[in-house]
Image (spheres, rainbow, N blue to C red):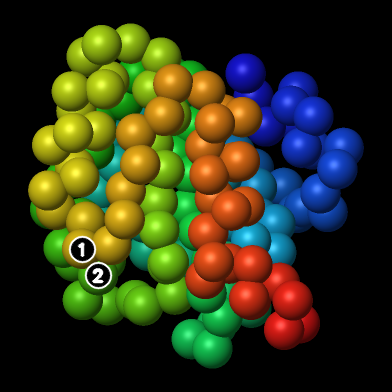
Amino acid sequence: MTFENSKYSKLLDYKKVVFPFGNVYITKQFIVSELNEGIHVDFTMVSELIGEFSEDISNDIRIGYIANRLNSYSFEPQLWLDFNNDYDFLVASAVVTYSDFGYLNSSLEKHFFKKSLKRCHSLDEAIEWMMELDELKSEVNSK
């Protein structure tokens, strides 16, 4: 299920940004990415995403990230290490997978991400988990 077709798109305020490689949604608590079939996620693409949201994401806020993997694409697990070194605004991440292979890939990524990374079988599961994180509850309440 896409974020826009979920019940949360009607419950939460969000900003949608369309990239050539997929769609990204930003809420007060988390970012959801829905990337296109067959792309390869590399540092250049991640930098473009960060650049687009630089006004929304500053060093003084904490936010979660949800990769809603509706499509099959490749991802360099090493990016999590680079990302952890360069940015510190992510509290946690959730990866929504729709296949056994996708779940195995997200298990590998879990070893590279220094913070909490939850593997989920639905977007609802990922959003509900993200919204229950104490770190994000305090961020929303402090704004």
Q: Residue at x 54, y 50 (%)?
A: 130
Looking at numbered disc 2 in the image, what kind of residue is underneath it? Asn
Q: From the image, which quarter does the N terminus lie in?
A: top right
Left or right: 137, with 46 as reference point: right
Where does label 1 land, which residue? 114
Q: From the image, which quarter does the C terminus lie in?
A: bottom right
Q: Residue at x 19, y 28 (%)?
A: 105
Q: CA distance from mark 2 to mark 1?
A: 7 Å
Cβ atoms under marks 2 and 1 closer than 8 Å: yes
Where does label 2 land, which residue? 84
Picture quadrant of residue 2: top right
Residue 16 pos. (x, y %) = 72, 47
Picture quadrant of residue 116: bottom left
Residue 60 pos. (x, y %) = 54, 88
Q: Residue at x 56, y 81 (%)?
A: 61
Residue 18 pos. (x, y %) = 64, 42
Residue 50 pos. (x, y %) = 47, 66
SS category of the residue bearing label 1:
loop
Task: Depth check: give the residue in front, 23 or 88.
Answer: 88
